[in-house]
Image (spheres, rainbow, N blue to C red):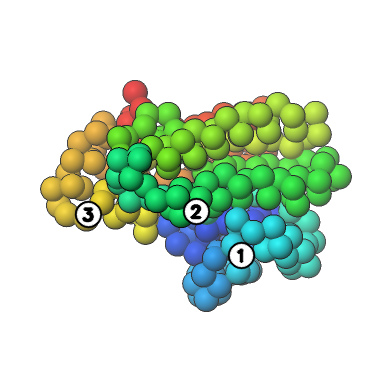
Amino acid sequence: MKLDGKTAIITGGASGFGLGIAEKFLAEGATVLIADIDGAAAEGAAQGIGAFAAQCDVSKDADVAALTATAIAKMGRIDILVNNAGVTHLPAAMEDVSEEDFDRVLNVNTKSVYLAAKHIIPLMKAQGSGAVLNVASTAGVSPRPRLSWYNASKGWMITATKSMAVELAPAGVRVNAINPVAGETPLLKSFMGEDTPEMRAKFVSTIPIGRFSTPQDMGNAAAFLCSDEASMITGVAMEVDGGRCI
């Protein structure tokens, strides 16, 4: 019960890595609010595991402000923020990615971190404690071709993590990131371009441990980094990647 008594917001929590993190946090004693752009999916996931739910487009200021207010109303405080919501563009030459897709990737993957900080960090500063976890990617460390703007957004997230960590440490707020390798999530097909046995085998061949990551893998890493066991750890971007980045 390493998160006993803690409260947490998890964005993009209705499926994939976010749901895995939510399930692990609940098992470790936390009270959890799942936020997702798909409000019905958030409600369904939350009912299934015993969490709260909220609809939220993390790229919109008003939505993040409303999410913050909902979290306070339902949980009383915010101890942990997991910035998990993310999107990608389909594999393509960098110059062929549409401006619309570029804006969407940057708004969801980077602006969301800014908006969450704008609304939630002041509350953590006021209470003198908090843990933020940004779900980045191995793509920000060891980029794949034809995913250039997604790669760049995750590199931004890693740098933001370190900058937030050094600025917020005196306020008692820790900020870390995890870098997942491709896993069994709704984004997998988008990363690969096509979901075929051959493409899956090609992806797995780049992972020394020999398998995709799972939501449970991310939940385990996230629970540690957001717990008091990691009280001396801040500014870390932990690779949860089966050796992919070696």
Front residue of this view, candidates 153 and 223: 153
Pick whichever of labels 3 and 1 is earlier in the sequence: 1
Front residue of this view, candidates 246 and 98: 98
| Residue farthest right in this picture | 126
**Residues at discs 3 and 2 in contact (Cβ within 8 Å):** no
Amino acid type of the residue tagged 2 in the rendering: Arg
Callout in the foreground (1, 2): 2
Residue at 42 percent of width and 29 percent of height: 141
| Residue farthest top in this picture | 246
From the image, tell me which residue sits under label 3: 194
The answer, for residue 114, to whether it is visible in the render is yes
Give the image location of residue 35, x and y in percent: 59, 63
Q: Is residue 148 left or right of residue 34?
A: left
Q: Is residue 175 left or right of residue 138?
A: right
The label shown at residue 104 is 2
Residue at 78 percent of width and 41 percent of height: 129
The answer, for residue 219, to whether it is visible in the render is no
Pick whichever of labels 3 and 2 is earlier in the sequence: 2
The local crowd at label 3, few if under 14, some if 14 to 19, many if 20 or more residues have their Cα within 10 Å, is: some
The local crowd at label 2, few if under 14, some if 14 to 19, many if 20 or more residues have their Cα within 10 Å, is: some
Q: CA distance from mark 3 to mark 1?
A: 29 Å
Quadrant for the C terminus, please. Answer: top left
Pick whichever of labels 1 and 2 is earlier in the sequence: 1
Number of numbered markers: 3
Q: CA distance from mark 3 to mark 2?
A: 21 Å
Give the image location of residue 210, x and y in percent: 24, 38
From the image, tell me which residue sits under label 1: 56
Amino acid type of the residue tagged 3 in the rendering: Glu
